[in-house]
Structure formats: C-alpha cells, structure tokens
Image (cartoon, rainbow, N blue to C red):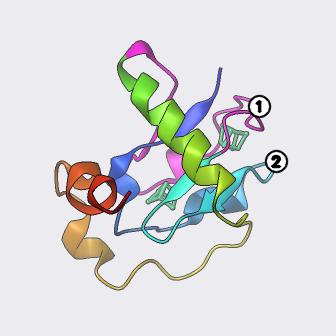
Amino acid sequence: MTYIVTDRCINCKYTDCVEVCPVDCFYEHELMLVINPEECIDCGVCVPECPIDAIKEESFNLIEWIEINKNLSEESPNITKQKDPLINADKYKDEEGKYEKYISKVR
Ligand code: SF4
Ligand code: F3S
C-alpha cells in the first residue's frame, strides 16, 4: 500500500506535505510533487497537511496515479523542505482535469 499525489497538486505545489514525511519520499516534478510508492510507508501523516486535499490513499480508482507517481518520482529530484508554492497556485487549485491539460501532453 502507498499514498499518492493526485492531479490536484499540478500547478500548485504548496509543499506542506514534505515537512512531515518520516521517510522523505516526495519528489519534485516541474509541475507537481509525487510520492515514490516503493518508499512510502503508508503512515498517512502527509494527508491532512495538504491544503487542497491532493494526497490520497492507494485505491482501485487511482491505479493510474500509482503508476504516474512511480514514473515521475524516478525522474525527479527528492524534496524534503517546504518552499513557496507555484506563482499561480491559488488560481489553479480548483481546476479539473489538470493531468490531461498540463502533463500528458508533454510526455
Ligand atoms: Fe510519507 Fe507517510 Fe505520506 Fe507516505 S503516507 S508519503 S510515508 S508522510
Ligand atoms: Fe502538492 Fe499538496 Fe504537497 S499541493 S506539494 S500535495 S501540500
């Protein structure tokens, strides 16, 4: 089992989540953070830290997102310290379908 970051994080990256992870398993893609599913110990403490509810527990509905977190974490640097969110985070935080609009097109 793992937790995963979903597309709500895209264009936002509030980064509160990274401060509490006991195993430092968040990775920073240009547009979003992801969790390495092989490193996550399923503790759940990051979930309430995200102000926009972007982190979810693994579930059947989110299988695609486990793969996305795995792939992006393998090509992105580790992040362990909170930093400023992306400049237009508040504008994008409630937008739907962000993966299709902003990430799948460039992959
Ligand atoms: Fe880290 Fe725990 Fe969140 Fe997994 S569930 S990413 S181990 S804080
Ligand atoms: Fe993203 Fe929420 Fe963390 S917006 S960076 S998952 S605090």
Q: Main secondary structure of the magenta part?
A: loop
Residue displayed at 33% across by 58% down: 103
Indicate the quadrant where residue 81 lies: bottom right
* Residue closer to the observer: 101 or 55: 101
* Residue closer to the observer: 61 or 74: 74
> In the rendered image, which residue does mark 1 sit on?
41
| Mark 2 and mark 1 residues within 8 Å of each other at the beta carbon | yes
Residue 75 — which label?
none
Mark closer to the chain start, 2 or 1: 2
Q: State the quadrant of the N terminus.
A: top right
Q: CA gap, disc 2 to disc 1?
A: 9 Å
Mark 2 vs ligand 1: CB under 8 Å?
A: yes
State which region is magenta. 36-60
> In the rendered image, which residue does mark 2 sit on?
22
Q: Is residue 38 above or below residue 10?
A: above
> Judging from the image, what secondary structure is the residue with disc 1 in?
loop
Q: State the quadrant of the C terminus.
A: bottom left
